[in-house]
Every structure is written in structure tokens, then in C-alpha cells.
């Protein structure tokens, strides 16, 4: 006989949406609970085993720990709380599905709400959970809390997904002009938690803070949480937006918004960023060009999710099939030199050391170090993608995949393979005074700006600074000019093979 007890409680399942403002799934859960005279049970489930081949990396876990702590504090300040459940290390195997069913039973829930995710493994997992919950009689509702426009809402005239950013973004802009839904403010008060499920754990028991070398650097560099995200956005709009176009490529200057980790964890929504920037530009004509330039970068984030949704195999396979036969090298020593920032090219090494210490790397430098790996060293782009995945606090599967395939020339809207960044010229152009290199490669701090990106050409300065190449700082592990020619020759191999196959 079925339970006839009225089900008044709603569960909201937090995932990559760790905020209370402009959270459509959370808002829907609150409205359902209010309509049924019940309460909302906010839940977070730590289940890295359900993330396919891409469980959260070390840097991501550090951020998640602090973001969950901030969310819990916010919920408690409004009269509620956060139920944290751990699917790892239990005596019997647990899944998100089993945990949600258990919490629903113990709390008397009649509905479960969450915001959608778009990674291929998450889509399949969520479909199964939704089906199971519905079959038990629960009302299940999902929302879009992560994107301006969902991947299936934008199509070419032929009804196909886009593979080129320009027309994709124009189509998005046309839709955004029609859809003027404003961000929703956070609730001022929440219904109290009446029952604490037996499955409840603590954030500390998730063991998200492994003893990794860069933990301290991440904590000293960043402050996780919704309040910090909103504060950083206002700081950027007030003092950074005006110079964004001219300074966005300068890693020695904070000329970017630094919103990427906040966006990845959902501490702020893209819609909040979109309307805040548009509002500022509407009141200041001088900022309009900069605002469009910045919002275009938000568009690239949308494009990456569009690609991942429609081409899920690209997390491990090149979108352009001819690149499956690319003659990649296998060199563990070269890979480790790149990872540790010991390539002998100061701009590359500075970027890799910044990443290791802070969990972030400037976007221009990401392109430089990525080009060096896949073209100068001819190492597989997946080696780089996996390293970034473990060390970036903003490790996002869609953006990480698109970025690496773009650089390797094997993805959608990709840079031509023959576009090989010269790490010396890139350093001289975007770190003209050498301040970025001096900060992250202190061995070269005394080298003059004109030579700092090519220290091997200034033996007298090196001697005066007490630096011996090969001891205090490495010789370049490859000759860039020679490496470029070898990379282009390798590309010609697959280009010729493609022509033969056609």
C-alpha cells in the first residue's frame, strides 16, 4: 500500500551552482515548498566517481571546500542549512541516486529540483536519476542555471550545431535581445530545516583539502564564495572594464575580470555578469566597446558548452578526424619540464609556475604554453588538458577541451596549425617590461627587460646576476625555429593523408 502522507518538502540538489541569487532551480524549489506549505532541504553530494574520466582535480577540490563553506554559512544566516552527503569511503557503495532517495524518504519530500549540467557523463547520470525519482512518485524539475542560452537552443539554418564562433554568437545575441529576463535576487529568509537526514556528513569529512603543494598559494590568491564573486564583479566593472580591451592580454597587469572560477562553481551566474556589464555600459558610452569585447568572452564560454553538448567525444578525440593520425611525440622528460616551468623559455616557465602556485593562469599565457606543448614539443594536447584539469581552480571540461583543441588546430573554429606562437616574441609583446617573468622566474629578476625573454643571448648579464644556464636556469629544451619546422612537417603528413582520402 502506498504512503498517503502529504509530501510537502522539496529537495534542492546543489552542484555547480553554489549561490542563492539568480539560482532558478533553487527558486523553483522554494516556490514549490511554499505552495505546498512545506520546507526546502538544500543538499550537496560529493560523488567524484560519477564524473567519468574527469573527477575533480586537486585545485578544484581546494576551491570547492571553501565554496561549500561559504554557501553553508549563507544558508544558515537565512535560517536554513546545507545537508552534505559523502558517497566516498562508505561501507557500502553509495550513489547520488541512492542518497537522494534516502533523503527524500527521511525528510518526507515530494519533489526534487536541480540545475542542469552539460558534460556527457553528467547528462546520462542525471537522466537515470530523474527517471528513478519519478518512478517513485517524486516530482522532478530541472532548470538552466549555468548558461545564457542552452546548447540545443542555437542551430544553424540547416538545423545543425555551430562549429564557428562568429555566426554562433550572432545567433545568441539575437536571442538575448528578445529574452530580457533579469537576474533574481537572493531570498531574504529561508524556511528552516526540520529534519537532518541520517546521511548527513560535514564538509571537513569530504577530505577536499589534500596536502598539495599549491594549497596555500590558492588560498592566499583567491576567496571563494558568492559574496566574493559579486564583489569581484563590481570591482572589475568599476576599475577594470574601461581598460579591458587594451590590457586584457597583459599578464603583468590585472586587466581581466578574474571571474572564471566563480563562474565554474556557479557562485555567480553568466546572466548576472551579462546584465551588470550591460547596465554599466548603458550609462557610460565610453565603455560600450569594452563591454562588447568582454561579453564576447562570455560568449566563448557559451560556445564551449555548445560544442561539448553536441560533440561529446571531443573530451578525448579531436573534432577534426584527420588529427587522429597526427604523429605526436612521447617524451616524459619534456612533459615534466613543461609542467614544472623548466623549459628554458621564460614566458612559458612563468605561466606554468603561476599555475602551480595560484591555480590560475592568464588566458594569453595559456595560449602561449599550450602552443609550446603541442607545437614546439609536439606532445599530445590531451597531456596538457589533463595537467590543466588537475591544477586549474577554474577547470571546466567544456572550456578546457575547446581551448586545447583550438590551440592544437584540431577543434571547432581552431587556430590554423601553422600558427605557432614564438614564446620569445610573445613575451616581448605582452610582458614588455619583464615584470611577469621577474615575479614567477626570480632567477632572472636581474636581467634587463630587453633580454629577459631570451636570457641565453645575454651571457654578461647572466654572469653579473650569478646565473649559470643549465644550473640556475635551464637551457631551452628545444630550438624554437627548428621545432616550428618539425611541427609544420608533421602537419603536412596528415594534410597529405586527408587529401588522399578525399
Image (cartoon, helix red, strand yellow):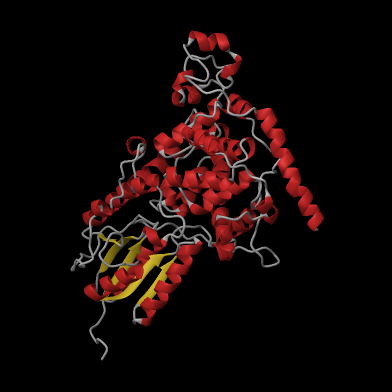
- Residue drawn at point x = 58 percent, y = 46 percent: 381
Residue 30, by quadrant, is bottom left
Q: Is residue 51 left or right of residue 110?
A: right
- Residue drawn at point x = 34 percent, y = 50 percent: 64
Q: Please state the horizontal and vertical placement of residue 129, each as a whole percent of the image.
A: 40, 72
Q: In which quarter of the image is the C terminus?
A: bottom right
Q: 448 and 298: which one is in front?
A: 448
Residue 359, by quadrant, is top left
Q: Image height check: is 475 above or below 10?
A: above
Q: Image height check: is 390 above or below 286?
A: below
Q: Image height check: is 64 above or below 85?
A: above
Considering every residue shown, the one lying at the far bottom of the view is 1
- Residue drawn at point x = 77 percent, y = 53 percent: 498
How many numbered circles are shown? Answer: 0
The reply to whether residue 295 is in sight is no
Q: Is residue 459 left or right of residue 203?
A: right
Q: Quadrant of the N terminus?
A: bottom left
Q: Please state the horizontal and vertical placement of residue 337, each as a whole percent of the image.
A: 51, 33
- Residue drawn at point x = 38 percent, y = 82 percent: 135
The reply to whether residue 38 is in sight is yes
Q: Is residue 354 left or right of residue 46?
A: right
Q: Please state the horizontal and vertical placement of residue 479, each as a whole percent of the image.
A: 64, 27
Q: Please state the horizontal and vertical placement of residue 169, each as a whole percent of the image.
A: 62, 54
Q: Image height check: is 209 above or below 89?
A: above
Amino acid at each position: 500500500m502506498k504512503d498517503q502522507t502529504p509530501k510537502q518538502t522539496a529537495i534542492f540538489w546543489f552542484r555547480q551552482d553554489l549561490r542563492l541569487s539568480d539560482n532558478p532551480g533553487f527558486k523553483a524549489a522554494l516556490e514549490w515548498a511554499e505552495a505546498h506549505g512545506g520546507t526546502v532541504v538544500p543538499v550537496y553530494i560529493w560523488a567524484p566517481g560519477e564524473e567519468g574520466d574527469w573527477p575533480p582535480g586537486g585545485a578544484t577540490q581546494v576551491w570547492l571546500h571553501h565554496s561549500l563553506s561559504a554557501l553553508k554559512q549563507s544558508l544558515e544566516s537565512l535560517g536554513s542549512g546545507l545537508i552534505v552527503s559523502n558517497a566516498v569511503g562508505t561501507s557500502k557503495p553509495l550513489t547520488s541516486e541512492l542518497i537522494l532517495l534516502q533523503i527524500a524518504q527521511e525528510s518526507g519530500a515530494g519533489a526534487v529540483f536541480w540545475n542542469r549540467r552539460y558534460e556527457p557523463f553528467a547528462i546520462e547520470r542525471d537522466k537515470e536519476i530523474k527517471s528513478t525519482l519519478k518512478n517513485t512518485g517524486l516530482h522532478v524539475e530541472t532548470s538552466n542555471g549555468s548558461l545564457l542560452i542552452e546548447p540545443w537552443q542555437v542551430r544553424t539554418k540547416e538545423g545543425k550545431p555551430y562549429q564557428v564562433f562568429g555566426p554562433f554568437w550572432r545567433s545568441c545575441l539575437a536571442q538575448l535581445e528578445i529574452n530580457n529576463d533579469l537576474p533574481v535576487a537572493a531570498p531574504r529568509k529561508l524556511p528552516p530545516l526540520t529534519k537532518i537526514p541520517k546521511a548527513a556528513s560535514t564538509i571537513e569529512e569530504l577530505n577536499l583539502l589534500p596536502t598539495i603543494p599549491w594549497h596555500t598559494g590558492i588560498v592566499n590568491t583567491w576567496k571563494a564564495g558568492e559574496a566574493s564573486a559579486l564583489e569581484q564583479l563590481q570591482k572589475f566593472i568599476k576599475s577594470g572594464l574601461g581598460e579591458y580591451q587594451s590590457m586584457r592580454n597583459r599578464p603583468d597587469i590585472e586587466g581581466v575580470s578574474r571571474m572564471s572560477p566563480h563562474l565554474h562553481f556557479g557562485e555567480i551566474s553568466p546572466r548576472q555578469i551579462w546584465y551588470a556589464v550591460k547596465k554599466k555600459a548603458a550609462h557610460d558610452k565610453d565603455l560600450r566597446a569594452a563591454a562588447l569585447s568582454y561579453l564576447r568572452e562570455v560568449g566563448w564560454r557559451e560556445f564551449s558548452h555548445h560544442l561539448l553538448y553536441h560533440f561529446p567525444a571531443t573530451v578525448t578525440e579531436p573534432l577534426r578526424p584527420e588529427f587522429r593520425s597526427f604523429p605526436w611525440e612521447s617524451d616524459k622528460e619534456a612533459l615534466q619540464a613543461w609542467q614544472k616551468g623548466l623549459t628554458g623559455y621564460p614566458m612559458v616557465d612563468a605561466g606554468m609556475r603561476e599555475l602551480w602556485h595560484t591555480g590560475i593562469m592568464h588566458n594569453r599565457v595559456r595560449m602561449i604554453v599550450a602552443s609550446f606543448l603541442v607545437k614546439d614539443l609536439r606532445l599530445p594536447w590531451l597531456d596538457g588538458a589533463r595537467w590543466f584539469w588537475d591544477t586549474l581552480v577554474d577547470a571546466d571540461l567544456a572550456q578546457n577541451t575547446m581551448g586545447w583543441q583550438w590551440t592544437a588546430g584540431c577543434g571547432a573554429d581552431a587556430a590554423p596549425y601553422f600558427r605557432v606562437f614564438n614564446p620569445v616574441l610573445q613575451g616581448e609583446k605582452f610582458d614588455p617590461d619583464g615584470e611577469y617573468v621577474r615575479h614567477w622566474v626570480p632567477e632572472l629578476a636581474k636581467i634587463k627587460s630587453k633580454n629577459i625573454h631570451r636570457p641565453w643571448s645575454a651571457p654578461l648579464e647572466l654572469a653579473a646576476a650569478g646565473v649559470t644556464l643549465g644550473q640556475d636556469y635551464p637551457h631551452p629544451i628545444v630550438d624554437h625555429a627548428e621545432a616550428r619546422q618539425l611541427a609544420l612537417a608533421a602537419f603536412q603528413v596528415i594534410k597529405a593523408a586527408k587529401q588522399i582520402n578525399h
